Image (spheres, helix red, strand yellow):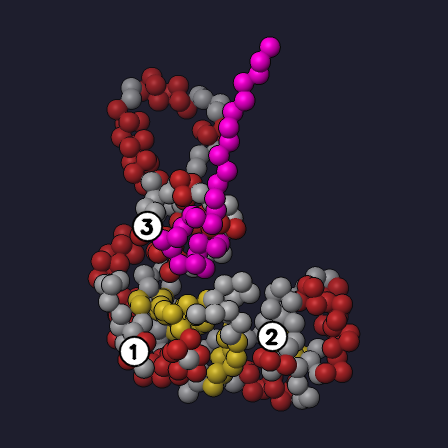
Amino acid sequence: MATKTTKTTRTNWKQLYLDLPENVAAILRDKRVKPEQLTGLADGEILALNLSDVDLETIRAKYPSSLADAEKKKRKETEKESPAKLDSAKRSDSHFYKYPRQVYGRSARYQALAKKINHDQASAPQAALEQLIASTGKDRGLDLHVNTLETGLRGEIKVPFSTGKTIRLEIFSDQTITALNNNEFNFDVLLATPADMPKLAKYAKVLGPKGLMPNPKNGTIVADPAARAKQMSSGASVAYKTEPKFPIIHLSLGKTSQKIDELTANLTTILQEIGVAKIKSAYLTSTQTPSVRLDLSSL
């Protein structure tokens, strides 16, 4: 008896998402998300792939979500059904009834703000800050997202004014070893002396992926950790680095309650120190607001 065989078409992942930035496309390919699946994902599911709000907006411009339209259509069809059918549906034991899929969308506030921002036009640093601060009206955080031309960029920038960010500093000691053995990481920066590094060597596989391993390049291996801790806690410096596999830098700029002149000075200094020639694009965002593209030519 002859058996029927079916041909399976292999997905050529390298040819997918050529219309998206390479760093975004690389994540989607790595997570094995096909275009037809992408339109069916909620915004929260896309952000969970380690993508930023800026990346989400870029994706939605090319691959709009089909969830909102599908949900509206389903709701209208349900409203037309008779009460008897509705009662029958409620008695259903199906998996989808017991565990309904939550569909998330942008709030009315977010959509109203998005209409006021021209995404095709870049704004100078001060103008971009004024747009965001005027739209928030509260004490919210300001974040800078920089798409660079290459990975491996890192450094520390002296900014004119404090960013208001609290950094949890840890100076290596026996207590640090105890905490690491208990899988506790109650610090954002670990400072150590060159003599401490042999003791930290066996924790490199744990601290390295988290970006917590002391390194002379970012000034966390120093002869005087106490003096270095005092300098970093003053808030007048910003450490930056691209993500391990993608040319993206995420930085906290400060709060919307801070003076506009101080924020502008910090933002301008950061972009100039990273190097405009190394930056592909930069976006400024606030909490739960659309992003504003920065005009790098104005620097």
Across and down, in percent, residue 153 comes to 51, 74
Is residue 139 visible to the viewer in this orientation of the structure?
no
Across and down, in percent, residue 144 comes to 40, 70
Q: Is residue 96 above or below residue 162?
A: above
Q: Earlier in the sequence, mark 3 or mark 1?
A: 3
Task: Give 37 or 277, whichever is nearer the viewer.
Answer: 277
Residue sitting at 52 percent across and 85 percent down?
Answer: 234
Task: Give 41 or 231, whichever is nearer the viewer.
Answer: 41
Residue, disc 1: 297
Task: Give 162 or 54, whichever is nearer the viewer.
Answer: 54
Is residue 5 visible to the viewer in this orientation of the structure?
yes
Q: Secondary structure at mark 2?
A: strand
Across and down, in percent, residue 282 comes to 37, 70
Per the rendering, the mark at residue 189 is 2
Task: Give 186 or 244, whichever is nearer the viewer.
Answer: 244
Q: Residues within 10 Å of mark 3 (few under 14, many from 20)?
A: few
Residue, disc 3: 62
In contact (CB < 8 Å): disc 1 and disc 2: no
Q: What distance separates the C-alpha of mark 1 from that of mark 2?
A: 34 Å
Task: Tell me where the magenta segment starts and ends, as one range.
Answer: 1-27
Per the rendering, the mark at residue 156 is none
Residue type at mark 2 is Val
Q: Main secondary structure of the magenta part?
A: loop
